[in-house]
Each structure stands twice: as structure tokens, then as C-alpha cells.
Amino acid sequence: MIHLKSQIPHNDIQRVIASWGRPDTITANQSHYPTDFSRDIHPIPCHSHNDYDRRVPLYDALAAGCLSVEADVWYSPRDLLVGHSLNSLTQSRTLQSMYIDPLISILSHQNPKTIDGVETNTSSLHGIFDESPSTPLILLIDVKTDGAKTFPFVANALEPFRSRGWLTHYNGSAVIPGLITVVGTGNTPFNLLTANTTYRDIFFDAPLADLWGEDAPADASHLYDATNSYYASTDFDKAVGKLWHGMLAPLQVERIRGQVGEAQKKG
């Protein structure tokens, strides 16, 4: 390394690089960008399943570039608790403390109201990932308790995002992309989610197995489309069956292609 270092020419470029950001240089205020929270992180289409079990929930997933994180949510009289099962719940692990508040902090940092005393253009919002600022983070909320009781509290918990204009939403005619896309799964009630036909900012995890196939309910397919559903998923074993020596049978391939194809048609 000493030998290689000696081969680098001693010029002004090298001097600037070596002293970048130091207090006594002209680059003292350039040591970082305003949106450097996710600097050098390239977002990829991966999902942090049971994200709350990570050593550092949310942040571990973002550091890996995950575009989607999942929180299992349980209703309690005091708050919405997050955990895998009842015996894992504590009053300190809540949807607010683990996801809502951190995301407010991150996105507020990414979207400063002023820079050097000058107001910024708030109409151009900057997402979590600096490499892809228009890419939303997907917050998958798996409702574990009674859907009708829990859903209004989930919707209310999202108000800090809603009031800041950060949520992907349906305005009655089109889906407007935001910085965060919220998807409800588990016991999320589809009827309550779609009750408002002119505005909604929680989308559904549609039942993929109901979209295609001879066993699919006759009246189910038309219920789900891109205005109310973001995902379409199903249990692989139940929908497709076990693999024989790791191989898919022709009928299994047909079923996968049929279900995925129908989901693609619906956007």
C-alpha cells in the first residue's frame, strides 16, 4: 500500500480529496449532502419479513436496500403493539415507536423545509433512497387482531404521513405515488379499506388464489384491481402444492403462470 500510495501524483486534486470536509478548508461545509441518509444504498425489490425481529428494526432493512418492510400489528387499548405473537408483545414496541416516528425523522431529514434560510420546493418530495428518490418504501401492516376493531386505529396512526402528503393514495380516479405505500394484510378488512371511493391511502394484499383457476370464487376476481390492491399473494403450499424432488409439475407451472398472469392484468 505504501508503494501504491507513492505512485499517486501530488497535485491539487489529491490535496482537495485528502482534506475534503475538514473545518479549516474551503470544503468544510461540503462534507455531506442534505439527503445523505441513504448514500450509496441501492434499493432492490426485497422484503423484510417480520422486520421487527431484526437486530435493528427498519434500519437494518433500509441499510440492505429493502423496498418493503413488514410489521405485525396487534390492537391494545393503549396502542398498536408490534410483535410475532401475544407473548412477544411489550408496551415499548409499538407501530408508532418502531415505524411511524423513525420514518418521520428519516423523511423530514430527506426533505428539509429550508436550506441556508431559503425555503425548498416542497412540491418535489425526496424518498428514503437517495439513489432512487421517487421510489416509495412499502410498509406492509399485518393485522393480527380483529380487523374491524383494529383497522380504524391503523388508519389514524398514519395521519402524520397523511398530513405531510407522503402517502401513496387513490384520489377517486387515479393512484398518486407517494414516499410511503401502506399495504394491509392479515385481518385487514377489505370492505372497510374500500369504503371510501374518493380517497384511500391503505391498499390491500389481494388473495392471489382467488384471481384465477377452477377453484377461484366466481365473484372474487372483479373485486381487486390496482386502485385498491398493491400486492396479490397466497400461501405457496396451499395454492401450488409440494414440490417433487424440487421440481414443478406441469400443472403446477400452469397454475403459477395463470395466477401471476391474472395479477399482472390487474396491475
Image: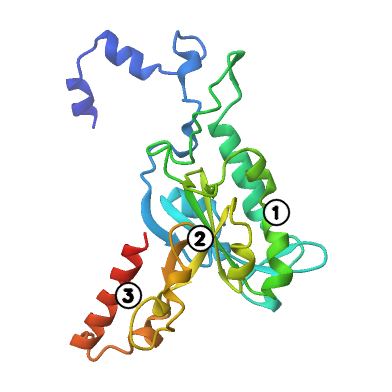
On the rendered structure, is 36 left or right of 113? Answer: left
Q: Is residue 93 visible?
A: no
Q: Measuring from the top left, give residue 164's x and y in whole percent.
A: 63, 38
Badge 1 is on which residue?
Answer: 157
Q: Measuring from the top left, give residue 186's x and y in whole percent.
A: 57, 73
Give the CA separation, mark 3 to mark 2: 18 Å
Q: Measuring from the top left, give residue 39's x and y in whole percent.
A: 42, 36
At 44% from the left edge and 84% from the top edge, which residue is drawn?
A: 217
Q: Is residue 171 visible?
A: yes
At 78% from the left edge and 68% from the top edge, which residue is drawn?
A: 76
Quarter residue 111 falls in: top right
Work out whether residue 34 or residue 111 is closer to the camera in this orientation and state it: 111
Quadrant where the image shows the C terminus: bottom left
Circle nearer the N terminus (2, 1): 1
Mark 1 burial class by Cα count in 10 Å: few <14, some 14-19, many 20+? some
Badge 3 is on which residue?
Answer: 259
Q: How is the image coloured?
A: rainbow
Circle nearer the N terminus (3, 2): 2
Mark 3 falls on what kind of element?
Answer: helix
Question: Given the current orientation, which residue lies at the most extreme right position?
Answer: 77
Mark 1 falls on what kind of element?
Answer: helix
Quarter residue 103 falls in: top right
Quarter residue 105 falls in: top right
Q: Amino acid at mark 2?
A: Asn
Label 2 close to label 1 by CB (< 8 Å): no
